[in-house]
Image (cartoon, rainbow, N blue to C red):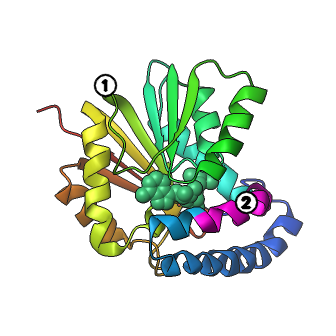
Amino acid sequence: MNETLVSEENAPFRRLLRPVIKALRLAYIQGTTVVKFLPSEKAIQLYYKYRRKSYDLQWSMDPGYRKGLTRLVELTIQEEDRVLDVGCGTGSATIMAAERAREVVGIDLSPHMIELAAQKVEEKNLLNTSVAATSVEGYHPDSPFDKVISSFMIPHVKPALRQSIYSCMYDFLKPGGLVGLFGSRGEVCDVYETREVIMENLSNAGFRDIVIHDVYDIYRIAIAKKPLA
Ligand SMILES: C[S@@+](CC[C@H](N)C(=O)[O-])C[C@H]1O[C@@H](n2cnc3c(N)ncnc32)[C@H](O)[C@@H]1O
């Protein structure tokens, strides 16, 4: 499924702006290639220790990012759900999910990003939400989740290890649960997965009914189901 940029309104000035916004998005996404050069968990933590202050501001400049997150939440989450946000960073998706779901847990490798996420949760008085500093691999929940979401975490994982991260997400889910992933596209920037690779990784991890939505020029949402049995 392909969707168009920024707004559904057809105002002429918006049409004129489209190529400019698209070029800016492309430039920004190409910049995220830097995560390829972070060789270890410690390096990722150090990177986000300094990056965290500008993180929300940078992403807020692209309305497509926020719309993409909103779409991810709409496509994945229902009000009775207990949701896990994997690699939640400063908690943007966690908070959107919390406004819709019964309970949300956000986890992230970076204690500095988690500190910002925790502040937001407190400021918004979200009693159904908690966050914790842990890697995906080191996380062992007491009970499985209805939904797992993740936004822009996968590029941090070396391609050969991505399938094991998807396997962790699979294990975090109840049978019949859904995973929803938001990111960019390997066809646009090579730290992300192409349509074929994401299908293959999800399917090798055990997921079925995989649906991919290409949204807002450079973004992609993938939804997949853990089978009932
Ligand atoms: C680009 S940020 C995305 C943050 C947030 N999901 C968003 O959309 O704004 C990627 C996040 O993934 C986290 N991360 C990277 N590898 C991780 C891992 N193995 N386990 C948990 N979090 C990880 C980083 O610490 C970082 O906060």
Q: Amino acid at mark 2?
A: Tyr
Reply yes or no: does residue 100 show up in magenta. Answer: no
| Type of the residue with mark 1 | Ser
Which residue is nearer to you in this view: 208 or 49? 49
Q: Is residue 4 left or right of residue 134?
A: right
Residue, disc 1 = 143
Q: Nearer the viewer, residue 213 or 115?
A: 115
- Reply above or below: 216 against 17: above
Task: Say left or right for 132 vs 145.
Answer: right
Look at the image and tell me whether residue 70 can be seen: no
Contact, mark 2 vs mark 1 (Cβ under 8 Å): no
Main structural element of the magenta stretch: helix, strand or loop?
helix
In three-dimensional space, the C-alpha distance between marks 2 and 1, rounded to whole angstroms, equals 31 Å
Please identify the residue farthest to the left as the structure is shown. 229
Read off the magenta span. 46-62
Q: Of the numbered discs in the image, which one, if any, rests on residue 213?
A: none
Is residue 61 one of those drawn in magenta? yes
Q: Relative to 88, is 143 on the left or the right?
A: left
**Helix, strand or loop for disc 2:** helix
Which residue has dot 2 on it? 55
Give the crowd class for mark 1: few <14, some 14-19, many >=20 residues within 10 Å: few
Residue 122: x %, y % from top left: 73, 27
Cβ of mark 2 under 8 Å from ligand 1: the answer is yes
Residue at image coords 46%, 64%: 41
